[in-house]
Amino acid sequence: MLGQLYESAACGQGWDDTVRQLAAHWGAQTSWIAALDVQRREFALSAFTSPSPELLPVAMRFCSDASANPVMAVALRSPVGLIGTFEYTMPREELVRTRLFEEAIRPFDAEEMMAVTLLNGEGLFVTCSVYRSRRIGAFTEDEKKRLGFDFAHMRRAVRIHLRLQEARRRAAALTEVLDHVTIGVILLDREGRLVVANRTARGMLDVRDGLRARNRRLWADHAVDGVLLRQRIDSATLAVDGRCSVAGGELAVRRPSGRRPYELVVAPLTMVPLAWSVGAARVLVLVQDPEAVVEPSARMLRRQYGLTPAEANVCVALAGGADLRGFAEAHGVSLGTVRTHLYRAMDKTGTRRQVELVRLLVAGV
């Protein structure tokens, strides 16, 4: 059971199998590991097993509303490590008169409960609970002691899961942000293995024109460039730990297509928030393609130059190679209207001719 517990924590999956094993281990029909964000009333983790799956939404509703759940109200004040039963929270004669009992406990034959508080603080309440029929009998003192022995492992596993979950969330958020950057951004770990590559970098690696990813490592096609790239990455990795005074550096990577070389900057990743967001990332590689044409977005032009939507759309079309007449026909407007939008855009961007405007846009606003 412990092996399954830690495997679930590490990979973020398999929690359903874990709670099934917990239920079987304690002779229970129902088992639940729940991590509740007390302020938002949302679950950061919910692993549940029961012969009655329809119990879960009912249980979640009562857990999210402590005012309708006197058991939860007491549990939220319980110290970490406390092992309790329904009787710990209130006398049975009071419990049977509650909505909780009428709607969640009795209908699903879950009148015997044993739970342990795994975490309780900083707005997060985490508990592991098992439930069984009253016909089987109450949980014994021996069973409570055995749950106490497993408590440390369960608490550690949940902490690992929540930390990795947060790291994955931050990494996903960072990747989404980096995908909007027009320069290639690659993050490597201490061994030089690829951790994150933004959309621009992935495009460069996919075409295999001078740079490629192989076995999760960044390679240059040209032999000499490959050696130099490896040296830059190794020195940046050593610099993270203060073991090298020369950290990374610049590099031009030749391309078999004959296009101008990629321009690379390799540096140690010393920005703590960024490094923490992507876990193992320790080296930053920036890749600039001097042949790339960056087409601006209409939203970016509106924000930077105060263009109207119509003016911005004309500018984007021109940057993409369209002509005024073709744009007018495609959008069902007159050529005169399009020219008016063009002149106003030129006035706002400080350009005097159409070619100057296009050059400004293509250069990357």
Image (cartoon, rainbow, N blue to C red):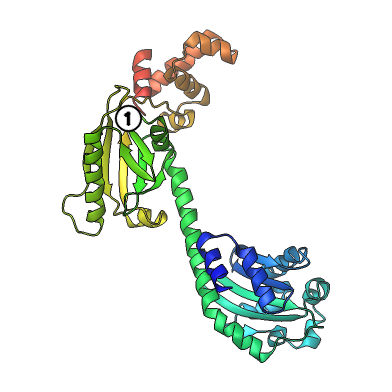
Q: Report the quarter where the N terminus lies.
A: bottom right
Side (left or right) of 266 relative to 183: left
Q: Quadrant of residue 56?
A: bottom right
Q: Position of residue 63 (x, y in %)?
A: 68, 70
Residue at the (26%, 53%) spot, across then down: 237
Residue at the (68%, 87%) spot, across then down: 88
Q: Is residue 185 visible?
A: yes
Q: Position of residue 106 (x, y in %)?
A: 82, 76
Q: Nearer the viewer, residue 4 or 83?
A: 4
Up the image or down, 201 lies above or below 327; here it is: below
Side (left or right) of 119 relative to 365: right
Up the image or down, 25 lies above or below 361; here it is: below
Q: Residue furthest left?
A: 245
Q: Is residue 352 visible?
A: no
Q: Nearer the viewer, residue 215 or 300?
A: 215
Residue at the (65%, 71%) spot, across then down: 21
The residue carrying pointer 1 sits among few (fewer than 14), some (14 to 19) or many (20 or more) residues within 10 Å by Cα, namely some
Q: Position of residue 349 (x, y in %)?
A: 37, 23
Q: Secondary structure at mark 1?
A: loop
Q: Position of residue 258 (x, y in %)?
A: 29, 21
Up the image or down, 83 lies above or below 294; here it is: below
Q: Amino acid at mark 1?
A: Asp
Residue under label 1: 289
Q: Report the quarter where the C terminus lies.
A: top left
